[in-house]
Image (cartoon, coloured by chain):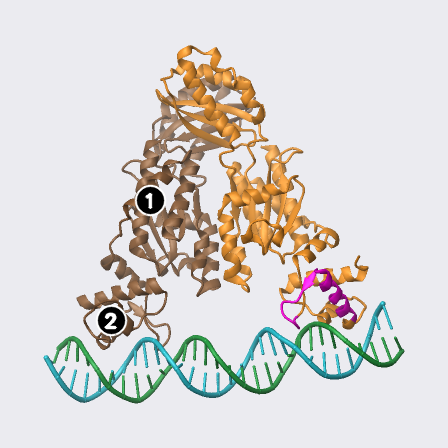
Chain colours: A orange, B brown, C green, D cyan
Amino acid sequence: MLSERRLEVLRAIVQDYVGTQEPVGSKALTERHNLKVSPATVRNDMAALEDEGYIAQPHTSAGRIPTDKGYRLFVDKLAGVKPLSKPERRAIQNFLEGAVDLDDVVSRTVRLLAQLTRQVAIVQYPSLTRSTVRHVELLLLAPTRLMLVLITDTGRVEQRVVDCPAPLTETTLADLRARLNSRVVGERFSEVPRLVQDLPESFEQGDRGTISTVLATLLETLVEEPEERLMIGGTANLTRFVHDFPLTIRPVLEALEEQVVLLKLLGEAKDSSMTVRIGHENAHEGLTSTSVVSVGYGSGNEAVAKLGVVGPTRMDYPGTMGAVRAVARYVGQILAES
Amino acid sequence: MLSERRLEVLRAIVQDYVGTQEPVGSKALTERHNLKVSPATVRNDMAALEDEGYIAQPHTSAGRIPTDKGYRLFVDKLAGVKPLSKPERRAIQNFLEGAVDLDDVVSRTVRLLAQLTRQVAIVQYPSLTRSTVRHVELLLLAPTRLMLVLITDTGRVEQRVVDCPAPLTETTLADLRARLNSRVVGERFSEVPRLVQDLPESFEQGDRGTISTVLATLLETLVEEPEERLMIGGTANLTRFVHDFPLTIRPVLEALEEQVVLLKLLGEAKDSSMTVRIGHENAHEGLTSTSVVSVGYGSGNEAVAKLGVVGPTRMDYPGTMGAVRAVARYVGQILAES
DNA sequence: CCCTGGCACTCTCGACAGGCGAGTGCCAGC
DNA sequence: GCTGGCACTCGCCTGTCGAGAGTGCCAGGG
């Protein structure tokens, strides 16, 4: 186990390195933090920390920088979550309250998060699986073609065009619409398949094929989660780290374009509490020099989706975590109101 | 007026520079293109081209590179549009046909365009103003709160929550829904205000306020074009130009995050034909070292939106224009079918 | 009149060497 | 167990130099 002071030294190293982006030496440490010991002592501590793998030197005789393991310890034991200031919280609330629809909420959230953390922000759209049905609409486009519109309690809208095997009359359609809605409105998506299972049987023989087709499309939309969508923003912030540049930024931008990768990233943390994945803890190899801070958000107690930021491992963890948590909280509120 | 051969020299310079990304000298030119004259002659031509402002040298005694003016001449007079190969066209069609809804069409188009051109792709969602109404749906969420859903002929869906001044019954709502749809379905957005103007008068006194509120929201959605949305992709391609790097990429990423800027960018070209804006021709200062190739696309003869790519001024114009044109054409087809 | 080969000049780029300074590890003393 | 001192290492910066590429100009030839 590391002594109290050595932990203190590690904390100082992380803080200084995050601030200056440069390897930090023993002398600078004693000057900037009042550790009440001499540089020589700190050097001994640093040697110990290096043996344990918490810090490393880029080259012999340069200062030390934290390793992934060092950041991990810092986040777990040494850092709190820095709460936002009153004005910041007011600003968040004001900014989010102006949103007119779900797309707008998400896009505002992304911009806000990117601006607050000065990093790349990722916001997942409220997930379908945990949502409930608000309404299902069916529109006849042509005798054998109709459009299915699904509206969820989170305000999300999905639509599909369905080609029917046989023509359908307006009356049959109205009938189907009414019965369908009376069964599924207010229900969770996972319940829907069970609830509509026997619906075709209550229609005339000739229409059953069509009804089944429509229902199949509906279930597809619900179950397959055809696109767990998300929005990202603040990619320009990547350019703030000009040092190790093109090498780092390229794979990150590529990873960010792969929605699948990002969804997996957000999905990896099982529960909805705040999660920090540092450097190589991220499975995707384009992101091994970045850290991901994510948290669930939702309209009620339960999280319906996640949001977070991606930044260099050398990020201001307390500040970032504070911003992410605060934004998630307010977005939850906004969703609950609408 | 420039002689035939000098134009040929300019073309050669542009082609070589686009290929190699390096200033091109007189000797290399005569070797790679059979100009049938000596390097010395080419040097004289180059001096003339430089006097006219079509090319420039980064430093004394380096090769020449084209200026914005040079690219402009190249695009206008010297370059054709390079048609895509059969397999490429097949691939486009196959890829786009798999789309399930409008979002999917747009997202596939973006990815496709980014991949084909190896540049940043921008696709605007089909615009509301030129669209027609397919259906308007009204749902009662609470006695004084309803949701308005607008579906356009391009498959786009907009929804708004409306707070009513007075409670509304299901029957009145059904009545409104029916009358509203019978008037506006199939009509252009610009016609709608006129068509619904006298609608409140046909309802009972007590409901008129509510009806007016609903209609006002509808008109707002139609007219204000509250969000001309678009999607971008392929930003990782920006990192292919590692040379002048952080300086260039930063403002570009920032500009790309500003949807307003991009919409203006696409909107600037008045008609829907292929437009190329080179370097400083772009109003936004973050984009002065990039070129934008854009074209309108639509389901019928008329364009409903635009798409294009953003890349460095030193891009392969014929190839890029070919890809952009082809993609626009196929997207139009897909939209027309659905 | 235009093209051509030759020549001197300019300028960038990479390699190399030397000096500087930051930072370290170790040791003896308190 | 902490501290000051000291020798050492090594990366970075600077200046110098030579090579190479490209140019502009000029005189000669078709």
Task: Please check whether the numbered discs 2 and 1 fall on a single chain.
Answer: yes
Q: Which residue is mark 1?
A: B327
Q: Which mark is residue B293?
A: none
Q: Are marks 2 and 1 in contact (CB under 8 Å)?
A: no
Q: Say which chain tag 1 marks.
A: B
Q: Is residue B144 magenta?
A: no
Give the extent of the magenta segment.
Answer: A41-62
Provide residue B131's location: percent of width, then percent of height: 35, 34
In which quarter of the view is residue B192 placed?
Answer: top left
Q: Nearer the viewer, residue A61 or A179?
A: A61
Provide residue B268's location: percent of width, then percent of height: 35, 50
For the point 46% across and 54% down, which residue is it?
A: B236
Horizontal side, residue A73 vs residue B299: left or right: right
Q: What amino acid is found at the position of numbered circle 2 in the picture?
A: Thr
* Residue B202 versus residue A274 in the image, above or below: above
- Can residue A242 be seen here? The reply is yes
- Can residue B298 be seen here? The reply is no
Could you tell me how far apart the alpha carbons at marks 2 and 1 are, in whole angstroms? Answer: 36 Å
Q: How many marks?
A: 2
Q: Which residue is mark 2?
A: B30
* Residue B227 versus residue B18 in the image, above or below: above
Q: Is residue A54 magenta?
A: yes
Q: Say which chain tag 2 marks.
A: B
Callout 1: 10 Å neighbours few (<14), some, many (20+)? Answer: many
Q: Nearer the viewer, residue A205 or A232?
A: A205
Name the N-terminal-most of marks 2 and 1. Answer: 2
Horizontal side, residue B116 vs residue A292: left or right: left
Image quadrant holding the N terminus of chain B, namely bottom left
Q: Nearer the viewer, residue D4 or B164?
A: D4
Provide residue B216's location: percent of width, then percent of height: 45, 30
- The kind of secondary structure element at disc 2 is helix
